[in-house]
Every structure is written in structure tokens, then in C-alpha cells.
Image (cartoon, rainbow, N blue to C red):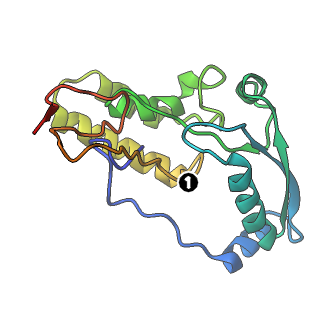
């Protein structure tokens, strides 16, 4: 979930990058010499203007621990169709939200979205689903935030996929423009905008 989204849990921390520990875990999983994997990358997307470069950076990081990634690319329609069927080993993908609600970010990881949306990891956790469903059914923002925070903890503990980056929007405007704010979740809003 984007750090700009209300109810984002700022207390969650990523595990430290530890090459020695990664190699030890591979050995423990019976891959002491690593393994080969296909890493899918989509064509240009608005949230990632150079997905091939990102895949190459991941490929280089994985190679350090013995995982050899072959980068695979498809045109967008084919990419999404094959990913929804679960044909990939690993892939990169993004999401752009134009709805300022945490449910829009979290629901894509629910059990009900496997094969029909962007739950390409095919992860299913009933307690996660229960938390986001209960949150979506209440109007109390404090209670929704509490439930969404718990759901984020479940997600972080199981880490079905790894968020890499969040796009930042910039807008060039004339210094005479007043009241303009960038909407990080969608279209440009001109309500309250004026000139001085």
C-alpha cells in the first residue's frame, strides 16, 4: 500500500538485505548452488518507464546469491493473460490507484482475486481476507484503520510479493497559480485553483 494512503502502517520495516543469510536460506532449502528462474517484465508502463532496467537490476541482485534469472517479456495483453493463469515463475508489475481507499490497494492480494485481478502471486490468507472484508464493511475510520493495519502486518509477515517503489508525481505550474495540489491517487483536480 502506498505510504501516501491513509491507514498506511509506518511501523512496518523491511528485513535487512543480507547476502550471507540469503545463501544460507537457499542451502537450507536444498539449493546450495542456487537455481534458475524466469523473471517476467512488462513493456513500458506509466508507473515504470523502464521495466527492463528494473528486471536487470533484480537479476544482478539475485545472481549474487546464486539465482540465475532469465528475463522474459511479452506485450501487455499477453503478459496479463499469462500471469493471471499463473504461468510465471516471478514477475514485476505495478498498480495505479485512482480510488483514495486502502481497500483498493489491499483487495488485489485477497483470495477472491486469484486469477481474476492482480493477485499474480496467487497468495491466499483467510485471516487477511477477513480483516480487509471487515474493514470495508465499516464506516468508522478508526476501526477501518485498525483492521487495515492488522492486515498489513499479516501481509508483511508472509510477504507474498515485495513492493519495490512508489511513483511520485510532479507538476510544473506557473507561480501565479494558487490552491493547486497534486492528487497522488488519480486525475488532476481544479477545484479551488485560481490565479493571483
Asked if residue 4 lies left or right of residue 14, the reply is left
Depth check: give the residue in front, 155 or 70. Answer: 70
Which residue is drawn at the image coordinates 84% and 43% (left, top)? 72
Depth check: give the residue in front, 190 or 28. Answer: 190
Disc 1 crowd, CA 10 A, few/some/many (<14, 14-19, 20+) = few
Farthest bottom residue in view: 20
Residue that badge 1 annotates = 164
Q: What percent of the width, then of the height, locates residue 183?
A: 31, 36
Quadrant of the snapshot with the N terminus: top left
Asked if residue 174 lies left or right of residue 192, the reply is right
Q: What percent of the width, then of the height, locates residue 171?
A: 36, 43
Task: Give the quadrant of residue 45.
Answer: top right
Farthest left residue in view: 196
Which residue is drawn at the image coordinates 37% and 25% (left, top)? 133
Helix or strand or loop: what does disc 1 sit on?
Answer: loop
The answer to whether residue 65 of the structure is visible from this angle is no
Image height of 174 relative to 24, above or below: above
Task: Give the quadrant of residue 123.
Answer: top right
Quadrant of the snapshot with the C terminus: top left
Asked if residue 171 lies left or right of residue 53, the reply is left
Which residue is drawn at the image coordinates 78% and 24% (left, top)? 78
Q: What percent of the width, then of the height, locates residue 68?
A: 86, 61
Which residue is drawn at the image coordinates 55% and 54% (left, top)? 164
Labels in figure, total: 1
Depth check: give the residue in front, 166 or 145. Answer: 166
Q: What percent of the width, then of the height, locates residue 77?
A: 73, 22
The answer to whether residue 101 of the structure is visible from this angle is yes
Image height of 39 relative to 103, above or below: below
Amino acid at each position: 500500500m502506498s505510504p501516501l494512503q491513509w491507514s498506511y502502517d509506518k511501523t512496518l520495516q523491511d528485513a535487512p538485505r543480507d547476502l550471507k543469510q540469503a545463501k544460507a536460506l537457499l542451502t537450507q532449502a536444498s539449493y546450495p548452488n542456487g537455481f534458475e528462474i524466469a523473471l517476467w517484465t512488462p513493456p513500458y508502463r506509466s508507473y515504470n518507464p523502464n521495466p527492463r532496467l528494473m528486471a536487470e537490476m533484480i537479476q544482478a541482485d539475485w545472481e549474487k546469491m546464486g539465482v540465475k534469472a532469465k528475463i522474459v517479456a511479452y506485450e501487455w495483453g499477453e503478459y496479463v493473460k499469462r500471469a493471471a493463469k499463473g504461468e510465471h515463475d516471478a514477475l514485476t508489475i505495478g498498480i495505479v490507484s485512482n480510488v483514495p481507499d486502502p481497500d483498493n490497494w489491499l483487495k488485489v492480494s485477497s483470495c477472491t482475486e486469484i486469477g481474476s485481478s492482480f493477485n499474480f502471486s496467487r497468495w491466499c490468507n483467510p485471516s487477511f481476507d477477513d480483516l480487509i472484508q471487515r474493514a470495508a464493511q465499516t464506516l468508522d475510520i478508526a476501526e477501518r484503520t485498525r483492521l487495515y493495519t492488522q492486515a498489513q502486518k499479516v501481509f508483511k509477515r508472509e510477504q507474498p510479493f515485495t513492493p519495490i517503489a512508489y511513483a511520485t508525481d510532479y507538476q510544473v505550474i506557473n507561480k501565479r497559480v494558487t490552491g493547486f495540489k497534486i492528487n497522488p491517487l488519480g486525475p488532476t483536480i481544479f477545484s479551488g485553483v485560481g490565479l493571483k
